[in-house]
Amino acid sequence: MADGSPATVDADAVIIGLIVEDGATESGAPPRLVAGADEVDAAFEGQLAALLAVAGATGKADEIVKLPTRGTITAPLLVAVGLGKVSGGSDGAV
């Protein structure tokens, strides 16, 4: 495991978690990024969840979506892992 920002860490891939918001499947809303993905989302100009949704991500449990980062972050690959619905709390911490 590396220390530092996930957006600038020297790694083969960065892994982030996604959750399903209540009512998201009905509304077509993108999945929500869990706590800790802020710097990676900022590197994608705040559009990471929307980009992942275009790639088919829903945040459902056990779902995996891979995206090449094309230099947006240091790691060449972003892996988003669906964690499903989260009960309680609203900060995205799981």
Image (cartoon, rainbow, N blue to C red):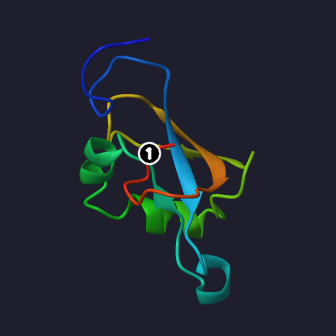
* Residue at position x 75%, y 45% in the image: 62
* Residue at position x 25%, y 20% in the image: 4
Foreground of the two, 15 or 60: 60
> Residue 56 placed where, x, y %?
66, 64
* Residue at position x 26%, y 43% in the image: 39
Foreground of the two, 62 or 86: 86
Q: Quadrant of residue 3?
A: top left
* Residue at position x 61%, y 81% in the image: 23
> Residue 83 placed where, x, y %?
64, 48
Report whether 27 appears left or right of 70: right
Q: Quadrant of residue 57?
A: bottom right
Foreground of the two, 12 or 18: 18
Residue for badge 1: 93
Q: Quadrant of residue 31?
A: bottom right
Looking at numbered disc 1 in the image, what kind of residue is underneath it? Ala
In the picture shown, does residue 47 fall above or below 67?
below
Q: Across the whole image, how many numbered discs are drawn on residues?
A: 1
Q: In the image as oriented, which residue stretches furthest toward the bottom?
A: 27
> Residue 33 placed where, x, y %?
44, 54
